[in-house]
Amino acid sequence: MKFPLVLCLLLFCSTGQAIVYHVRVRTSPYAYAGTDANVKIKIHGNNGVTDQIELDDPNRDDFEKNSEDDFTVEGTDVGRVRGVEIYRDTSGSGDGWHLESIGIKKGDQPGYRQFMYGYWVDADRWLPIPQNLHQL
């Protein structure tokens, strides 16, 4: 009788519950810093990494020069957020992108985990941005 209960608990715990993440992306103020490319993110934590998540608000022009864009997305619970990976493709008329920073907040937790970058983002490759523990 105990075996089915333990098996059910193991299966439930190993499925990786989806949670809400709040993602804040800051594009630099430099000339041509904005992008029309598709942008995706992976969130890394001490319990793993999310699948790739597209960042797009169809009601606005995301990632414009000197702008801050907020997204609410779902992904696997990775535990304590330790880093992010960012990706952009070459779609759109202006695909170059100068990323200033990314902030990640899990669910209802207070404050964002801040990941500073401050460089041009290469196209068609995943760019790791490691942890640096500043808060927004």
Image: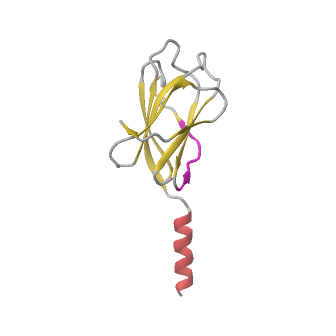
Single out the residue that lies furthest toward the right: 124
Residue farthest to the top, as pictured: 31
Q: Is residue 49 in the magenta section?
A: yes
Query: Relative to 102, is 96 above or below?
Result: above
The region drawn magenta spans: 47-54
The residue that appears at 66% across and 33% down in the rendered structure is: 125
Quadrant position of the C terminus in the picture? top left
In the rendered image, residue 43 lying in the magenta stretch gets the answer no
Q: Residue 14, percent across and down?
A: 56, 64
Numbered circles on residues, count: 0
Coloration of the structure image: secondary structure
| Residue lying furthest left | 110
Depicted 66 relative to depicted 56: above or below: above
Q: Nearer the viewer, residue 89 or 114?
A: 114
Q: Residue furthest bottom?
A: 1
Please give left or right for residue 75 compared with residue 112 in the image.
Answer: right
Residue at coordinates 47% horizontally, 54% vertically from top-left? 79
Q: Quadrant of residue 92?
A: top right
- Front in this rendered view, residue 77 or 73: 77
Residue 67: % across, % down: 42, 22
Q: Nearer the viewer, residue 101 or 41?
A: 101
Q: Residue at x 46, y 39 (%)?
A: 132
Whole-percent x, y for residue 134 in the image: 39, 38
Residue 104, image x, y percentages? 43, 41
